[in-house]
Structures are given as structure tokens and as C-alpha cells.
Amino acid sequence: MDQRSLQHSHPSDSRRQFLKTAGSAVVGSFFAPAILGAEDKAGVKNPVLGEGAFQYEATHGWGEVPKHIQWGETHGVCVDEAGLIYIKHRSHSKTPMDAIVVFDPAGKFVRSFGKEYHGGGHGIDVRKEGSEEFLYLSDTKHGIVAKTNLKGDVVWTIGRPATPEHYKNAKNRYSPTNIAFAPDGGFYVGDGYGSHYIHKYTKDGKFEFSWGGSGTEPGKMKTPHGMWLDQRDGTPKIAVCDRANHRLQYFTLDGKHLGFVNTVSFPADIDIQGETMVVSDLHARVTLFDKENKVITHLGYNQDWTNRVLDGFKIRKQPQTWEAGRFIHPHDACFDHDGNLFVTEWVSVGRVSKLKKLS
């Protein structure tokens, strides 16, 4: 997460107006999800988020973080075929620290790696190619995307594409935030904190084409932060978190604009399981959408709490003020194989929450 991007998009006056508008629109159409009582094994009640067939027991601060790791901003999460959970964080420690930490489904530490990504830990995704799984890592500080195996051994690393129309000189920033996989085995890279373009690559990491750029009109973006391949209706398309424009934007596989989804606030990333899409929203909520992209529920949503979170962004550095069942700045969320959700947040001390599916 780039704090300058967040603050630049919401000066104090426009932020208050946006909150008033967004809050009335959401509350007018959807009830805030109930937070019910549930007991964990220690007898301590965990909050339950959601409604109907989408209820989750929330465990905040999930995962037994080892002593050699001090969470920075927990930016990314993915789950491999064996059910291991990979967390990518950005530490501000002066001493290089592993940027990727791996846990088993019970939250036990398995391994860590990736000191070379220290300070730039951002997007992380996993894909099976043939009989082997690989991680795709986006590094905002060093301006690279790396493909590694599940132990962190590098297959290849790519930097800024040699496209003078997008990067006229060395001063033009290239800062990739996340990737999406293509049906042909290739992938897309979102230059979310740089040019606001999306770049398409082959499965071997060879550049193919780009689209986008900064703007508000269809096809243009302001911080294409996260994205995903959406095939729920049978037609593959790319869903992009056009974050600073407060919308999701849909494109064909070759980058032609298709449409918008506006029932988001400040979307950060996407994951899809079956017919359900989850969007981590930096404005203090996690939203589930159905196949037609209608809101199922806003997990953890409360407009008064959101107003507090966005009031100068102080709460992200004040864990003593955090409330159970509420989010601060969800930066990524993904499903595991059982339909549970793991949520990582852009907060100074890092936080991972497990949302156990109850219904």
C-alpha cells in the first residue's frame, strides 16, 4: 500500500463528502452484517461476521509468527494446493528480513524466505503449472516481478518493460503491485504505483502488450492495484481494482474496456472461488459479490467505524483501539479450499485474520 496514493486520493474535504455519499448508498441498500457471539477453544468469544449462507467466525492476529519475523504491513496472501498459507509483508526494519512467511492451516509456522524483497513485499499469487506450483511475487520497492518455486528459488525476474511510450526516461516510476493469470498460461502485471498501465506477458515472461494509463474515463485507471481472471459467466475477462477511481473495471483479455462495478469504496485486490468474488477494500471492509456482481454482504462493515479509520489514518498505528469484528485496512483476501477466508491488512504492525466459514 502506498500511503501517498491513499492520501492524495482523499483530501479531507473530499473524503468527508465521499464517506457521506458512499455510506448513505450502502446503508440504503444493505444492512450492516451482524456480529454475533461464538466461542473458540479457549472459551473466548470470537465475532461472527456476515449473514445467511455467508457467515464467518473471525480470528484476528492469526498465525504463530516466529521470533525472527516482525510483521511489517501485511500486504498479500495466497494458499497453495496443500493448504499452506503464504503471507507477504513489507517490513521497515533496517535489518533485511524474510518477506514471505508460510503457515500450515492450523497457523503453525512452516518456513520463511525472501530477504531480497525486503521493503518491497506486496502482491503474491500461486499457480500450478504442470505438476509443480509457482509463486508470482510483485515488489514495489525494487520494481520487479519474480517467479519462484514454493521454497523461494527464483525461476526468473522481470523489471520495467522496455516501452518508451510508457516510461520515457529512468525517472518514470515502475512499481508493480499485483498480477493476474491469463488462460493462455501468461499473466498480467498491474503497474499500480507507477504508470497506471497493465502489461501482458507470455508464460515465459516475455512482454506482449499494454493498456490503460492514468485517467477517469473508461479504459483509464488510477492505481490499478489488484486484479483477477473472472470466468464465472463462462467468458474469461480481467477484473481490475481501479482503486483511486473507487471502482472495479472489467476488460477483455486483450485490454478492451467492458464495464464497471461501482459498489466498492477503495478496492485493493480480488479472489474468486466458485461463483463468489471477494474484494478486500482498504476502507475497512471485505465485500462478497455473487455471479452477477451484486453485493452479498460487506464483512465487518460499520460506517461509523469506517469514518474513524479514515480520519487521518491514525488507527492503523494504534492497535489498542482496534475492535473485534472490524477491519482497518484490508489489503488482500483469499479463500482456502474449505471456503474460509484469510485477510491481510495494511497496518503498521501487520495483521492476518482468519474468517472460518460457518454456513
Image: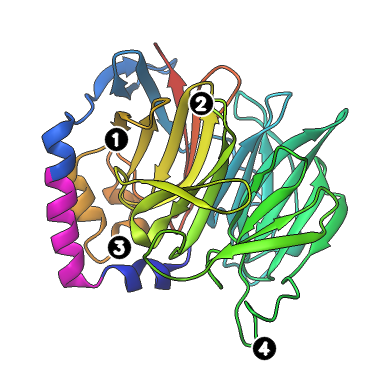
Amino acid at circle 1: Gly
Q: Is residue 307 positioned above or below 326 on the image?
A: below
What label does residue 169 carry, if any? Answer: 4
Q: Nearer the viewer, residue 195 or 125?
A: 195
Q: Residue at x 61, y 52 (%)?
A: 123
Q: Assign a secondary structure to mark 1.
A: loop
Q: Which span of residues is magenta-colored?
A: 11-24
Residue 47, position in %: x, y?
A: 31, 25
Residue 35, position in %: x, y?
A: 24, 25
User: On the image, numbered disc 2 is attached to which residue?
Assistant: 233
Whole-angstrom CA distance, mark 4 to mark 3, is 34 Å
In the image: residue 227, left or right of residue 280: right
Marks 1 and 4: which is nearer the front? 4
Q: Earlier in the sequence, mark 4 or mark 3?
A: 4
Amino acid at circle 4: Asn
Q: Assign a secondary structure to mark 2.
A: loop
Amino acid at circle 3: Phe
What label does residue 313 carry, if any? Answer: 3
Q: Assign a secondary structure to mark 3.
A: loop
Q: Residue at x 43, y 40 (%)?
A: 279
Q: Earlier in the sequence, mark 1 or mark 3?
A: 1
Whole-angstrom CA distance, mark 1 to mark 2, is 28 Å
Q: Is residue 37 magenta?
A: no
Q: Residue at x 37, y 62 (%)?
A: 244
Marks 3 and 2: which is nearer the front? 2
User: On the image, numbered disc 1 is attached to which residue?
Assistant: 300
Q: Is residue 227 visible?
A: yes
Whole-angstrom CA distance, mark 2 to mark 4, is 41 Å
Residue 165, position in %: x, y?
A: 64, 79
In the image: residue 85, left or right of residue 206: left
Amino acid at circle 2: Asp
